Amino acid sequence: MAYLSVGTRDLASAEDALIDGVKALMAWPGVGVPQNPEAWLLTAARHARVAAIRYQEVIAASEPTLLLLKETPRRCDVDRVSR
């Protein structure tokens, strides 16, 4: 948990990432146990954490545009509607 939360100090999201890393264990029966299982799990968890952070950044960056689109009235083309 400390390794995953050191950059953000967000224990809840670090825990979520660790759970995602543990879910990756399901691949081991098919591909075999890696040489360093602990490092493998931490890497999988770290990748899940980075993906979650990027997802939140995309959401935050798109919010102003979405709000603008919501507030902008749509113009109805009467000629098209009447055809």
Image (tube, rainbow, N blue to C red):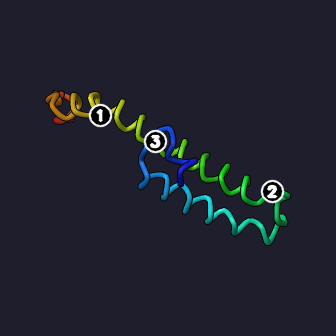
Observer-side mark, 2 or 3, equals: 2
Left or right placement of residue 9 versus residue 20 in this view: left
Q: Give the Cα separation between the discs numbered 1 and 3.
A: 12 Å
Left or right placement of residue 49 versus residue 77 in this view: right
Q: Amino acid at mark 2?
A: Asn
What label does residue 78 carry, if any? Answer: none
Left or right placement of residue 71 versus residue 21 in this view: left
Residue shown at 80%/56% (left/top)?
Answer: 36
- If you read the primary sequence from the N terminus, does the residue marked by circle 2 or circle 3 appear first? 2
Seen from the viewer's position, the closer of residues 35 and 32 is: 35
Q: Give the Cα separation between the discs numbered 2 and 3.
A: 29 Å
Quadrant for residue 32, please give it.
bottom right
Seen from the viewer's position, the closer of residues 77 and 53 is: 53
Residue 66, position as x, y percentages in the image: 27, 33
- If you read the primary sequence from the N terminus, does the residue marked by circle 1 or circle 3 appear first? 3
Residue assigned mark 2: 36
Residue assigned mark 3: 55
Q: Residues within 10 Å of mark 3 (few under 14, many from 20)?
A: few
Residue shown at 72%/58% (left/top)?
Answer: 38
Residue 45, position as x, y percentages in the image: 60, 53
